[in-house]
Image: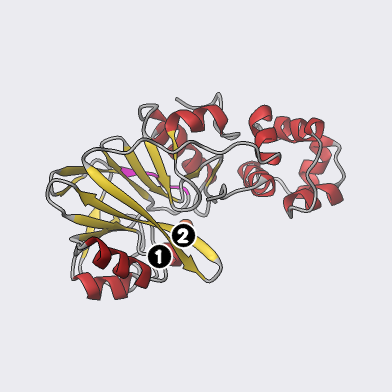
Amino acid sequence: MPLEDELGDVLQKARDGKAWSQDDLARATDIAKDDIQRIESYQLTPEDSLVLKLAKALDLDGPSLIDIAQERWMPKEPSTDPDFDLVCLNVFMGEYPVNCYLLRCKATGETAVVDTGANPKTIISKAREMGVRPNMILLTHAHPDHAGGLGELSDAFDCPTYIDHNEPRPKGSSNFKIVKGGDELTLGKLRISCIETPGHTAGGVSYLINRSLLSGDVIFAGSMGRANSSWKELFDSITQKVLRLPDATGIFPGHGPATTVAQEKEHNPFFKGRAG
Ligand SMILES: [Fe+2]
């Protein structure tokens, strides 16, 4: 699975954090606005010296940003947990892939769906193939690409849907259970901790099971989510919560490959030297 974000996406999100236009970035770096436009629309890969200039202006880590620009970094997969199976399903909304997960307690077989995606048939057939009937649906947030399939899955599995108290309720379930930071849910022998991680949306929540974090659109390998509700809140969610988890913690995001806390502290241009 390729990284969710390329250089152009990282630059746009970093500009968003400063509330800068492309003109502002051009002025700060002495790079022509035309070139910045082409870089952000993936038509131009600038040479390393220009990437370093962009990184400096945008408070990004230079060497990490060069690795993203040159497409030469990919995270190694986190280690698996002996207590549960975590199956990642790449569910498509049109052309756009979203990671949904089936989390199964190995001791009891009890299973949760984490984000429903917009096309639930993939999840329903995978659950059948695994011989499980999910007991709960956990939503990281309510965006349509993550929660669009809720109605069909609720009908198929007849189970409650958990969502953060600050998140709007998507259509499709009449059995919502509301969570807030610090809540702990039980799935078989597993304990699922709810960690509020707002910023991508006002009520974004991540679910921690042992040393695995299901984080929705908060952080991506080598990048961060889009700050739809608040850039500062999103940055703080990542630096003060996600990246303060133990280094070996696996991060399983809503888009792109899985990673770990250690790898993001070392390779993510937004957070190298600014987290932990
Ligand atoms: Fe989202």
Please say if 37 is above or below 65: below
Q: Amino acid at mark 2?
A: Val
Q: Is residue 216 above or below residue 62?
A: below
Bounds of the magenta segment:
195-199
Q: Which residue is mark 1?
A: 117
> Does the segment drawn in magenta span residue 194?
no
> In the image, residue 250 lies at what x, y percent?
38, 37
Q: Quadrant of the C terminus?
A: top left
Q: Amino acid at mark 1?
A: Gly
- Which residue occupies 44% across, 54% down? 201
Residue 174 in view of the camera = no
- Disc ID at residue 98: 2
Magenta stretch secondary structure, dominant:
loop
The residue located at (67%, 28%) in the rendering is 63
Q: Residues within 10 Å of mark 1 (few under 14, many from 20)?
A: many
- Give the residue drawn at x 56%, y 31%: 267
Q: Judge from the rendering whether residue 244 lies leftward or rightward of residue 47; answer left or right.
A: left
Q: Secondary structure at mark 2?
A: strand
For residue 140, the mark is: none
Q: How packed is label 2: few (under 14 Cα within 10 Å), some, or many (20 or more)?
A: many
Point out residue 238 in the picture as x, y percentages from the top left corner: 45, 37
Q: Secondary structure at mark 1?
A: loop
Return the x and y of residue 208 as percentages of the image width and height: 29, 41
Earlier sequence position, callout 1 versus callout 2: 2
In terms of image quadrants, where is residue 268?
top right
* Whether label 1 touches label 2, CB < 8 Å: yes
The quadrant in which residue 160 appears is bottom left
